[in-house]
Amino acid sequence: MAAARKGSSKSSGVRFSEDPPSHSHVHFDEKLHDSVVMVIPESEWSFLVKVGFLKTQHRYEIVFTLPEVASLGRDVCPAPIPNPHVCITDVAHQSDGSMKVTCEYMPHQEGVLCEDVMLVSESREDVSVRVKIHARVMDRHHGTPMLLEGVRCVGAELEYDSEQSDWQGFD
């Protein structure tokens, strides 16, 4: 057993406040960058959109705002290049020149995924903007991620499990 130092007035242990416990909730700054979808310009024609943690086999609606791209104009639409996992469903111009983009995304595997979509000008053939949707995707059986502001789960794809089937067949 260790001997205490002579003349030491410090005591070890935990000290609790004598104030009564507060029943308030913890509040965070609403503009905290970790809680919202982040749009990062990579160049004048390319943006990285970080949507946080998602689950495989779940369908998400993702809403984000792209800054104004003057050369794109106001007649913008999704490129007719199909992507089986992400689809732009709406592009709305804001009064400040920015674009509010809504897309639907269904991650197909675990890991860090990056899916590309394109916005094109309907009046100018040579002008387009590349949008990369970046997500960290977990298996559908491992917890529930806290979704960022701008991301909403709109459904889950069900897997068929033959062992749970009620159908017995004929003898």
Image (cartoon, rainbow, N blue to C red):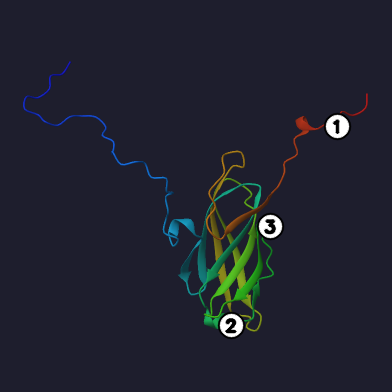
Quadrant of the drawing holding the N terminus: top left
Which percent across, then down, holds residue 33? Answer: 43, 60
Q: Is mark 3 on a helix, strand or loop?
A: loop
Residue occupying image coordinates x 55% and y 66%: 64
Q: Distance between the residues labelled 2 and 1?
A: 57 Å
Name the kind of residue labelled 3 in the image: Pro
Quadrant of the drawing holding the C terminus: top right
Categorize mark 3 by other alpha carbons within 10 Å: few (<14), some (14-19), many (20+): few
Looking at the picture, tell me which residue is in the foreground, 56 or 80. 56
- Of the two numbered discs 2 and 1 on the same chain, state the one appearing first in sequence: 2
Which percent across, then down, holds residue 90? Answer: 66, 69
Name the kind of residue labelled 1 in the image: Trp
Residue occupying image coordinates x 49% and y 59%: 36
Q: Is mark 1 on a helix, strand or loop?
A: loop
- The residue singled out by tag 2 in the image is 73
- The residue singled out by tag 1 in the image is 167
